[in-house]
Structure formats: structure tokens, C-alpha cells
Amino acid sequence: MHTSGDQRVKGIVLAGGKGTRLYPLTKVTNKHLLPVGREPMIFHPVRQLVGAGIQDILIITSTEHMGEVVRLLGSGKAFGCQFTYRVQEDALGIADALALAEDFAGGQPVTVLLGDNIFTHSIRGFVRRFLEQDRGARVLLKRVDDPSRYGVAALDEKQVLEIEEKPASPKSSYAVVGAYCYDCQVWDLIREMGISPRGEYEITSVNNCYIRLGQLSYDIVEGGWTDAGTFESLAEANAMMLACENRIGGLQEEKGGRP
């Protein structure tokens, strides 16, 4: 199927990190190679990007596990796409990993997925609406019961007004999940960022830069979502994907979703 994503946006899957919350499952393998439903976890973000019409995909992972990831995914032919690989040598945060993608992007917009985020429905509508924007960035939000665990978005009808990281008193119940679309400004914004008190270059800082520019739009996740970074959320991700046999639903394209 030809979709609006073709040739106009590149895909990035961030699959680095140490997976310490899943130890000892991650003692000898990368978190993103663990099973979710019937497939390795990393298959899911790849299928999401391909389903959004994105065929040029960069996989960023750690030095220790790059060989295993390449052996699993290959060239991309089996998925209907083409893979490029980069190594993040030090775990310095999501924005640090994203900075490695500038040459790959080549001035084109990008859709970035965290490799441990699992969605029951397609993100292709989200990507399409991003491409309809004149400029800026777009994020996906999900209403959650425990927003203080996440980056929390304060909203108006069109844009995100503020993102607070793990706030004690959340201003909304909408968490920013691991799917982001950025125009080519993102590389300059990352270069201007400082390192956070946690010792990382934070994706929330990138998103807040776009907020200051008045250029951060949003959609609401259709269907189910979880990250798979803890034992409990990995079990939830497995249950979600087993229930749908790892098939991705298509409702996201038809429903723009507002809170």
C-alpha cells in the first residue's frame, strides 16, 4: 500500500541502553531482542515504521549487542525496508543517540521510535499529520493512571504547552510516549542542549525546545500502549501482542484523537 510517508520521512529506532531494570534477562542480550508476543521486541517498531510508509530506517544500538541486532534484522529486505546501523558507545540518553542520526537524515524529517514501546494500532496517521505540518515536531500522548512516572504534557487544542519530567503534581494525565516526529531543526536544537542532572541528554529537553518555538503538536494514542522496560510492562506487552498475534491495528489513520 502506498502511504503518505513514502520517501519524505526517514525512520529511526533507538535500541541502545543497558536494560538494567530487566536484569538478569538482559545480562547476555539486548532488551530489544527479548520476545514480545511471537516476535523479538525490535520487530515491532520496524513494522510500525514500514506500516507508515517509511522504508529507510536507522537502527541505533549499543556496542555490546550490535552484532546480535544485525544478525537478527539483516539488510531489511525481509521487512520491505533498508536498514542502516549506528553504535551509541555511551548510554548518554535518547537525545544523544538521536544526534548520531543527523547524517542519515540528510536534511529530511524523521520519525523516531523507542525500541521498547509497543502499540496495538498503527502510527501511520500520526506520521501523515506530521507531514501536513509546515514545520516543527509532533509527539504521541497517552492517558495513563500514574502520570508521575512519565514526562507529562500540559495541552491546548493544538499544541503541547509544557512537558514536566516525572512531576510530583502532574498538570494532566497525558504521558509523552516513545514516538516522535521532528523536522531538520532538531539537530541544531540538540547541539545547543546541555546535559541534565541525570547525566544524560534528554528527549524532554528537545521537545521543550520545540515548545518554546511554538512548534510542538500532538496526537493521542489509539488503542493500547506500553513500554516494555520493566518486568511488569514486559508482561503487559507480551499479553497485548499475543492477543493480536503481533498484528498492528489500523485505527490510528482514521481517528486523529483529541483528549
Image: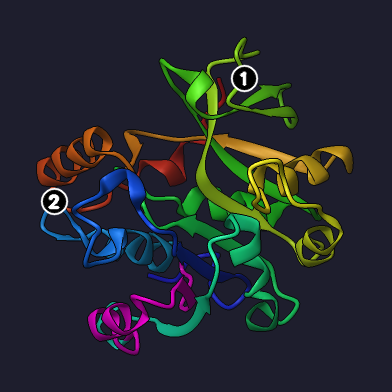
Indicate left or right for 254 with 216 as reference: left
**What residue is shown at x 23% (from left), y 32% (from top)?**
232
Residue 23 to residue 97: above or below: above
Q: Quadrant of the N terminus?
A: bottom left
Give coordinates of residue 56: x percent, y percent: 50, 80
- Colouring style: rainbow
Looking at the rendered structure, the kind of residue marked 2 is Gly
Depth check, front residue: 113 or 251: 113
Is 172 part of what is drawn in magenta? no
Residue 140 to residue 194: above or below: above
- The quadrant where residue 74 appears: bottom left
Q: How many marks?
A: 2
Q: Which circle marks residue 156 in the picture? A: none
Give coordinates of residue 65: x percent, y percent: 33, 75
Q: Tell me the residue that label 1 is attached to.
A: 167
Crowd band around label 2 with a 10 angstrom C-alpha radius: few (<14), some (14–19), many (20+): many
| Mark 1 element type | loop
**Magenta range:** 53-76
Indicate left or right for 209 with 181 as reference: right
**What residue is shown at x 35% (from left), y 37% (from top)?**
225
Looking at the rendered structure, the kind of residue marked 1 is Pro
